[in-house]
Amino acid sequence: MFDWQWTFAILPRLIVAAGNSLLAAFTAFPIALVLGLVLAIAQRTRFRSVKQLIREVVDFVRTTPLLLQIYFVFYVGPRYGLVLSPWVAGIATLGKRGLTDVFFATHAGMSEEEFEHIAGPWLERARHPGLGRRFVECAYQPQLELLQLLHQHDFRVFIVTGGGIDLVRSFAESTYGVARERVIGSSVKMHFELRPGRAILWKSNALNSFDDREAKPENISLHIGRRPLLAFGNSDGDLAMMLYTRYGRGPRLALLLHHDDAEREFAYDRNFHLSPLVDALDRADELGVTVVSMKHDWKTVFP
């Protein structure tokens, strides 16, 4: 018999642990970015011994489970002078992919309906801590106007996001007027189960698709089957999608939103480590991408 009393007793600790995992993942990303760059540069050395050492490190990271890496850093490291606190050891072994895995692991074992039941009420009340607005009210006024114009001229509009596909689907139609079947995003693998009078899809904790960078045009081709006429992005994670659009035959338009308005929203680009805007912004003219400045081009930001 399931012990609910014991479950509720440890629930506060589980919540704290989940929060620590998310914070560690966000903190680990810039560290992993710097270390990866250092290793990539060092691997170009002429010294074979250094190259071999780097290959061994990279192979270890790529081919071993995350839990084993944390064990190695925390318990084996001190034998060789690498003494880290449990917090730092966790950060050192997590990255952007780790953050995604942690996020999706919290939904494992849910059905589609159960997730929708949880997501709907949360979106109704959850507010952006910096803007003080509900998340579903953070759509931009020019964005909504562009969507309305496209719909009026019979364009088929799709949302292609790195966010969780089921979460975005739960508010896409009410907020943006985009049908849920026209949302493409990151997803987990699903398991089908047939019960008497019921057919259920369960979420697993295994990542199916992380819809970022090159995965975006790949998923556009897979799920839509047509190259877009217009693409609008706001980070380097959207650059592949914008170029996939831009280099198609006939008239095409790739737009890049630059968040440069600290007064009305936020100002960030290359310093936003989780989803930076560097290459797309620096090479926009070269690549034929039109940059839209939130500060200078938008009269109104939010409705």
Image: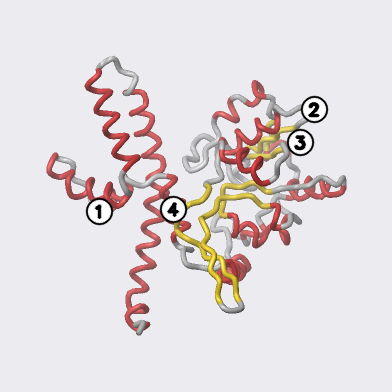
Q: Indicate which disc, 2 or 1, sits on the residue closer to the N terminus.
A: 1
Residue hosting label 1: 86
Q: Indicate which disc, 3 or 2, sits on the residue closer to the N terminus.
A: 3
Mark 4, residues whose alpha carbon is within 10 Å: few (<14), some, or many (≥20)?
A: some
**Residue 180 drawn above or below residue 200:** above
Q: Indicate which disc, 1 or 3, sits on the residue closer to the N terminus.
A: 1
Residue 90: x and y in percent read 30, 50
Badge 1 element = helix
Which label number is shown at residue 229?
3
Amino acid at dot 2: Gly
Q: CA distance from mark 4 to mark 2?
A: 39 Å
Amino acid at dot 1: Pro
Residue hosting label 2: 250
Q: Indicate which disc, 4 or 1, sits on the residue closer to the N terminus.
A: 1
Badge 2 element = loop
Q: Is residue 260 visible?
A: no
Closer to the camera in the image, 151 or 34 = 151
Q: Residue at x 74, y 54 (%)?
A: 178
Closer to the camera in the image, 205 or 136 = 205
**Residue 262 drawn above or below residue 207:** above
Amino acid at dot 3: Leu
Which residue in the rendered view is the most extreme toward the left? 79
Q: Indicate which disc, 4 or 3, sits on the residue closer to the N terminus.
A: 4
Residue hosting label 4: 101
- Front label number (4 vs 1): 4
**Residue 194 drawn above or below residue 22:** below
